[in-house]
Image: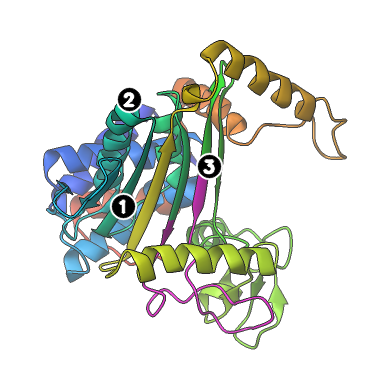
């Protein structure tokens, strides 16, 4: 494992993204996103994704130079917006969507933003964090291209049929950070499986199936033609299907990779800031007062442990596996890459 200062890692990631064809603003947004994922301990959506992105740009899977734009002509209600990523990476489109949601909520108290025609959006929790820092509650879900990204077996089946269609929920927090619940509707994400494979780690539980449908803890069982089990059985299948229906059936064409629906709410339309803070802290405190289970030092509010870890790593540096570090250096010197799962 190599420890890289945050500024250096950001600069390297930005250089890679500009080198594969991104405009300067997009390269900066994507680099910041990937480094933040590493800071929060979500390495599956961090700088290890650079090789995937370089491959996608090189093969024409998406347009690295694509810049998102806002469309309003087809929106009847002023609280509805549509962002077109113009076949580019999803991160700049999602940041634009968050900005639009913040502006719309300031006037109307709520917003619904559809993001279409984009590549990988990265960690959805990042956008919930952007909204939470502005005092907004968020619900975000993504899906699309089930014909191509067949990763998760439906409950009761063994063949992969859906992508890992993620969700993110965010609620403004206090000094310890917001509540961010960011998860795939599969028992793991494709990126986490790849990260575990790179680190030569096994899952704690048999959450994937091998090519014969047998449960396994080995991420390579999935990567070698198997499937990911749905999160919480039928619950994960139901949530995955709903995300797919909203992203594909409702929002339409989902190329190059996915569509995303972002819902933002200004909670102060229902309670004052003081009332909201008091009630939130009361609920958080009640949950955290539980006696910790064996192997746990305390109960954490989702998202706050990553918030604290990010602060620590900003000071100490970001741990990057040697294999990922070599891939980054290779991208900078020779431009080689390979595609990783979503």
Q: Earlier in the sequence, mark 1 or mark 3?
A: 1
Check disc 2 and report the residue beneath it: 106
Q: In this picture, is 45 found above or below 290?
A: below
Residue 100 percent coordinates (x, y): 26, 36
Whether residue 300 is visible here, answered yes or no, is yes
Nearer to us in this view, 326 or 9: 9
Location of mark 3 (residue): 169
Q: Which residue is mark 1?
A: 114
Give the image location of residue 206, x and y in percent.
72, 68
What residue sits 15% from the left and 46% below the top? 18
x and y, in percent, of residue 145 in the image: 36, 72
What kind of secondary structure does the magenta stretch mostly adopt?
loop
Q: Nearer the viewer, residue 96 or 92?
A: 96
Report, in whole angstroms, how far the alpha carbon at label 1 lies from the one at label 3. Answer: 16 Å
Residue 69 on image: x %, y %: 15, 47
Crowding near the residue tagged with mark 3, few <14, some 14–19, many ≥20 C-alpha atoms within 10 Å: many
Picture layout, residue 152 above or below residue 42: below
Residue 14 picture quarter: top left
| Residue shown at 65% from the left, 15% from the top | 278
Is label 2 in a helix, a strand or a loop?
Answer: helix
Q: Residue at x 50, y 62 (%)?
A: 194
- At mark 3, the secondary structure is strand
């Amino acid at each position: 494992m190599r420890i890289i200062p945050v500024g250096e890692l950001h600069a390297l990631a930005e250089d890679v993204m500009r080198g594969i064809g991104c405009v300067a603003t997009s390269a900066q947004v994507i680099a910041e996103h990937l480094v933040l994922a590493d800071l929060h301990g979500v390495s599956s959506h961090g700088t290890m994704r650079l090789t995937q992105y370089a491959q996608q740009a090189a093969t024409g899977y998406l347009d690295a130079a694509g810049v998102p734009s806002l469309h309003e002509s087809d929106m009847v209600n002023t609280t509805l917006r549509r962002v077109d990523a113009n076949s580019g990476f999803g991160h700049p489109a999602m940041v634009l969507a968050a900005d639009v949601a913040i502006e719309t909520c300031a006037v109307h108290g709520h917003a619904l933003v559809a993001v279409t025609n984009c590549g990988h959006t990265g960690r959805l929790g990042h956008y919930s964090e952007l909204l939470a820092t502005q005092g907004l509650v968020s619900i975000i879900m993504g899906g699309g291209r089930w014909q191509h990204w067949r990763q998760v077996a439906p409950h009761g089946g063994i063949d992969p049929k859906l992508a890992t269609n993620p969700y993110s929920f965010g609620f403004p927090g206090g000094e310890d950070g917001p509540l961010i619940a960011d998860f795939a509707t599969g028992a793991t994400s494709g990126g986490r499986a790849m990260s575990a494979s790179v680190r030569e780690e096994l899952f704690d539980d048999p959450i994937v199936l091998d090519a014969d449908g047998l449960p396994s803890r080995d991420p390579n069982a999935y990567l070698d033609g198997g499937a990911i089990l749905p999160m919480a059985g039928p619950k994960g299948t139901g949530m995955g299907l709903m995300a797919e229906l909203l992203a594909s059936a409702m929002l339409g064409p989902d190329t190059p990779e996915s569509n995303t629906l972002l819902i933002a709410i200004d909670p102060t339309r229902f309670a004052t800031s003081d009332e909201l803070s008091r009630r939130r802290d009361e609920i958080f405190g009640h949950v955290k007062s539980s006696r910790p289970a064996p192997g746990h030092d305390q109960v954490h509010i989702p998202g706050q442990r990553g918030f604290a870890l990010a602060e620590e790593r900003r000071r100490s540096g970001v741990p990057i596996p040697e294999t990922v570090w070599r891939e980054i250096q290779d991208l900078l010197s020779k431009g080689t890459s390979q595609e990783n799962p979503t």
